[in-house]
Image: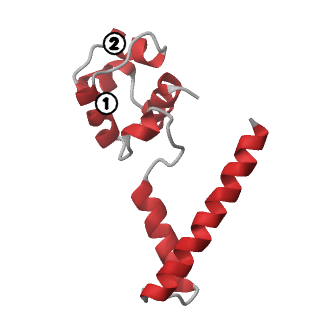
Amino acid sequence: MNFGERLRILRDTKGLTGEEFGKMVGAAKQTVSNWENNKRAPSKETMVKIAELYNTSVDYLLCNTDIRNEREVIETIKKILIEKGFTDRPEELEEIREFLAGAMDLYNLRKNKKS
């Protein structure tokens, strides 16, 4: 996956044409096409506009992460933890942080073996 592919997918999820999307971020239809075909990249300012439009991060747009919306992930985790009876006591939060850090280490090891 690259920036252009990710941008096209996001644009398609909103059902926008290249021209419609371009108007929303201040770019011509051809410019959007160049972005989606990885011939050019938007400015930093435009990248921020795109991220805001899709409620995501610039890191997600640039494929530095697959987490589209970090806040949604955090809220989902909080909801699950509350349902399981966890509280926000410091010792429980530290235990959860250590567990999640270990889980991420295992995930990254597995991901790197597949590469």
- Residue at image position (34%, 39%) is 51
Q: Looking at the picture, does residue 59 appear above or below residue 82?
A: above
As drawn, the residue found furthest toward the right would be: 113
- 50 relative position to 59: left or right: left
Report, in whole angstroms, how far the alpha carbon at label 2 lies from the one at label 1.
13 Å
User: Is residue 56 shown left or right of residue 64?
Assistant: left
Residue 8: x and y, percent? 48, 26
Quadrant housing residue 25? top left
Which quadrant holds residue 33? top left
- Of callouts 2 and 1, the N-terminal one: 2
Question: Residue visible at 38% across and 45% down?
Answer: 56
In the rendered image, which residue does mark 2 sit on? 31
Crowding at mark 1 (Cα within 10 Å: few <14, some 14-19, many 20+): some
Q: Which residue occupies the foreground of this view, 88 or 48? A: 88
Q: Which amino acid does label 1 sit on?
A: Met
Label 2 SS = helix
Q: Which colour scheme is used?
A: secondary structure
Q: Quadrant of the N terminus?
A: top right
The residue that label 1 is drawn on is 47
Q: Residue at x 43, y 31 (%)?
A: 11
Towards the viewer: 23 or 85: 85
Query: Along the horizontal axis of the image, is 52 left or right of 97?
Result: left
Where does the image place residue 41, in percent across and percent down from the top left?
A: 37, 18
